[in-house]
Amino acid sequence: MRRLPVGFQLTLGVAHYCPWLLYWWMAQKWFPNSRNPKDTMTKRDLELAEMHTKHSYIMETALRQGEHVRTQLTRDIIVGYGNWEFDPTELSNPFSDSNKGSVHIWCGLEDRQISRYVLLYIQTNFKLPWVKFHEVPDGGHYIIHETLRSHYQSRLY
Protein backbone atom coordinates (compact mmCIF):
# COMPACT_ATOMS: atom_id res chain seq x y z
CA MET A 1 0.00 0.00 0.00
CA ARG A 2 2.88 2.37 0.75
CA ARG A 3 4.10 2.01 -2.84
CA LEU A 4 0.97 3.69 -4.19
CA PRO A 5 0.78 7.48 -4.71
CA VAL A 6 -0.35 9.36 -1.58
CA GLY A 7 -3.65 10.44 -3.15
CA PHE A 8 -4.48 6.85 -4.01
CA GLN A 9 -3.59 5.70 -0.49
CA LEU A 10 -5.90 8.33 0.98
CA THR A 11 -8.72 7.34 -1.38
CA LEU A 12 -8.41 3.67 -0.45
CA GLY A 13 -8.32 4.60 3.24
CA VAL A 14 -11.54 6.58 2.88
CA ALA A 15 -13.12 3.66 0.97
CA HIS A 16 -12.14 1.22 3.69
CA TYR A 17 -12.89 3.21 6.86
CA CYS A 18 -15.50 5.80 5.74
CA PRO A 19 -17.21 4.49 2.59
CA TRP A 20 -20.13 6.91 3.05
CA LEU A 21 -17.67 9.79 2.44
CA LEU A 22 -16.10 8.39 -0.73
CA TYR A 23 -18.42 10.11 -3.20
CA TRP A 24 -17.65 13.49 -1.61
CA TRP A 25 -13.94 12.59 -1.42
CA MET A 26 -13.77 11.94 -5.16
CA ALA A 27 -15.50 15.26 -5.92
CA GLN A 28 -13.58 17.51 -3.49
CA LYS A 29 -10.48 19.44 -4.49
CA TRP A 30 -8.85 20.27 -1.14
CA PHE A 31 -6.94 17.01 -0.62
CA PRO A 32 -5.15 14.79 -3.13
CA ASN A 33 -7.12 11.79 -4.35
CA SER A 34 -6.95 9.35 -7.24
CA ARG A 35 -9.25 11.33 -9.52
CA ASN A 36 -6.62 12.28 -12.13
CA PRO A 37 -6.39 9.56 -14.84
CA LYS A 38 -2.77 10.48 -15.57
CA ASP A 39 -1.89 9.41 -12.02
CA THR A 40 -3.74 6.11 -12.14
CA MET A 41 -3.40 5.01 -15.77
CA THR A 42 -0.43 4.14 -17.94
CA LYS A 43 0.20 5.82 -21.28
CA ARG A 44 -1.13 2.72 -23.06
CA ASP A 45 -4.24 2.65 -20.84
CA LEU A 46 -4.95 6.27 -21.77
CA GLU A 47 -4.53 5.40 -25.47
CA LEU A 48 -6.92 2.45 -25.16
CA ALA A 49 -9.46 4.56 -23.26
CA GLU A 50 -9.29 7.27 -25.91
CA MET A 51 -9.61 4.72 -28.70
CA HIS A 52 -12.72 3.21 -27.11
CA THR A 53 -14.38 6.58 -26.48
CA LYS A 54 -13.80 7.91 -30.00
CA HIS A 55 -16.92 6.13 -31.15
CA SER A 56 -19.79 8.59 -30.91
CA TYR A 57 -22.25 6.11 -29.42
CA ILE A 58 -19.90 5.43 -26.48
CA MET A 59 -19.40 9.13 -25.82
CA GLU A 60 -23.15 9.82 -26.11
CA THR A 61 -23.89 7.03 -23.65
CA ALA A 62 -21.31 8.34 -21.18
CA LEU A 63 -22.73 11.86 -21.42
CA ARG A 64 -26.26 10.57 -20.91
CA GLN A 65 -25.19 8.62 -17.83
CA GLY A 66 -23.54 11.69 -16.31
CA GLU A 67 -23.21 11.33 -12.55
CA HIS A 68 -24.06 7.62 -12.79
CA VAL A 69 -20.51 6.95 -14.04
CA ARG A 70 -18.93 8.65 -11.00
CA THR A 71 -21.34 6.84 -8.68
CA GLN A 72 -20.48 3.50 -10.28
CA LEU A 73 -16.73 4.11 -10.01
CA THR A 74 -17.17 5.05 -6.36
CA ARG A 75 -19.08 1.83 -5.73
CA ASP A 76 -16.39 -0.18 -7.52
CA ILE A 77 -13.74 1.28 -5.21
CA ILE A 78 -15.85 0.50 -2.14
CA VAL A 79 -16.39 -3.10 -3.27
CA GLY A 80 -12.71 -3.60 -4.00
CA TYR A 81 -11.21 -1.86 -0.99
CA GLY A 82 -14.03 -1.45 1.51
CA ASN A 83 -14.40 -3.38 4.74
CA TRP A 84 -15.83 -6.78 3.84
CA GLU A 85 -17.83 -8.67 6.43
CA PHE A 86 -15.98 -11.91 5.71
CA ASP A 87 -12.41 -12.99 5.12
CA PRO A 88 -11.96 -13.94 1.45
CA THR A 89 -8.94 -16.06 2.34
CA GLU A 90 -11.22 -18.40 4.28
CA LEU A 91 -13.31 -19.25 1.24
CA SER A 92 -13.41 -22.94 0.47
CA ASN A 93 -12.50 -24.28 -2.93
CA PRO A 94 -15.65 -23.99 -5.08
CA PHE A 95 -14.23 -26.65 -7.40
CA SER A 96 -13.61 -29.24 -4.68
CA ASP A 97 -16.10 -31.76 -6.10
CA SER A 98 -14.42 -32.20 -9.46
CA ASN A 99 -11.13 -30.38 -8.67
CA LYS A 100 -10.94 -29.44 -12.37
CA GLY A 101 -11.60 -25.73 -12.14
CA SER A 102 -9.69 -22.73 -10.93
CA VAL A 103 -9.91 -18.96 -10.67
CA HIS A 104 -7.45 -17.09 -12.89
CA ILE A 105 -6.28 -13.60 -11.93
CA TRP A 106 -4.45 -11.64 -14.63
CA CYS A 107 -2.35 -8.75 -13.41
CA GLY A 108 -0.69 -6.14 -15.59
CA LEU A 109 2.67 -5.31 -14.03
CA GLU A 110 2.23 -1.68 -15.10
CA ASP A 111 -1.29 -1.43 -13.58
CA ARG A 112 -1.58 1.64 -11.35
CA GLN A 113 -5.15 0.99 -10.20
CA ILE A 114 -4.99 -2.54 -8.83
CA SER A 115 -1.76 -2.99 -6.95
CA ARG A 116 0.18 -6.05 -8.02
CA TYR A 117 1.57 -6.21 -4.48
CA VAL A 118 -1.89 -6.81 -3.03
CA LEU A 119 -2.40 -9.74 -5.41
CA LEU A 120 1.08 -11.12 -4.70
CA TYR A 121 0.41 -10.84 -0.98
CA ILE A 122 -2.77 -12.87 -1.35
CA GLN A 123 -1.03 -15.45 -3.51
CA THR A 124 2.02 -15.95 -1.28
CA ASN A 125 0.43 -15.69 2.17
CA PHE A 126 -2.87 -17.47 1.77
CA LYS A 127 -1.88 -20.36 -0.48
CA LEU A 128 -5.19 -20.84 -2.24
CA PRO A 129 -4.28 -23.63 -4.69
CA TRP A 130 -7.37 -23.08 -6.82
CA VAL A 131 -6.40 -19.44 -7.54
CA LYS A 132 -3.94 -19.08 -10.44
CA PHE A 133 -2.04 -15.81 -10.69
CA HIS A 134 -0.71 -14.59 -14.06
CA GLU A 135 1.47 -11.54 -14.65
CA VAL A 136 1.43 -9.61 -17.94
CA PRO A 137 4.80 -7.77 -18.21
CA ASP A 138 3.73 -4.69 -20.20
CA GLY A 139 0.05 -4.76 -19.23
CA GLY A 140 -1.77 -1.92 -17.57
CA HIS A 141 -5.26 -1.79 -16.09
CA TYR A 142 -6.91 -2.20 -19.49
CA ILE A 143 -5.13 -5.41 -20.52
CA ILE A 144 -8.50 -6.97 -21.29
CA HIS A 145 -9.14 -4.36 -23.98
CA GLU A 146 -5.70 -4.94 -25.46
CA THR A 147 -6.34 -8.69 -25.53
CA LEU A 148 -9.79 -8.34 -27.07
CA ARG A 149 -8.51 -5.94 -29.71
CA SER A 150 -5.70 -8.28 -30.79
CA HIS A 151 -8.11 -11.24 -30.70
CA TYR A 152 -10.58 -9.55 -33.05
CA GLN A 153 -7.85 -8.19 -35.32
CA SER A 154 -6.44 -11.69 -35.75
CA ARG A 155 -9.90 -12.92 -36.78
CA LEU A 156 -10.33 -10.12 -39.33
CA TYR A 157 -7.07 -10.70 -41.17
Image (tube, rainbow, N blue to C red):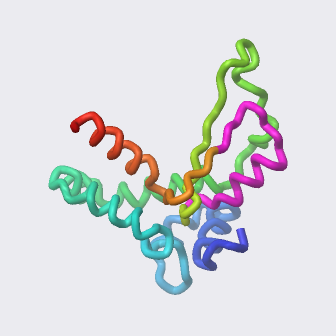
Residue at 27 percent across and 34 percent down: it is 155
The reply, left or right, for residue 15 in relation to residue 130 is left
**Magenta-span inclusion, residue 125:** yes
Left or right, residue 10 beside residue 69: right
Q: Of 132 and 27, which appears nearest the observer? A: 132
Asked if 11 appears above or below 108 in the picture, the reply is below
| Residue at (50, 69) in percent of width and height | 40
**Relative to the observer, which residue lies in front, 144 or 60?**
144
Q: Which residues are magenta?
A: 113-133
Q: Report the front residue among 40 and 123.
A: 123
Whether residue 121 sits left or right of residue 40 in the image: it is right
Q: Quadrant of the N terminus?
A: bottom right
Is 63 included in the stretch rendered in magenta?
A: no
Residue that sits furthest to the bottom in the current view: 30
Percent across and percent down for residue 76 are 52, 52
Q: Of all residues shown, which one is farthest toward the left?
A: 56
Q: Position of residue 10 (x, y in %)?
A: 63, 74
Position of residue 133 relative to residue 136, above or below, is: above
Residue at (55%, 66%) from the top-left corner?
Answer: 112
Give residue 15's quadrant in the image: bottom right
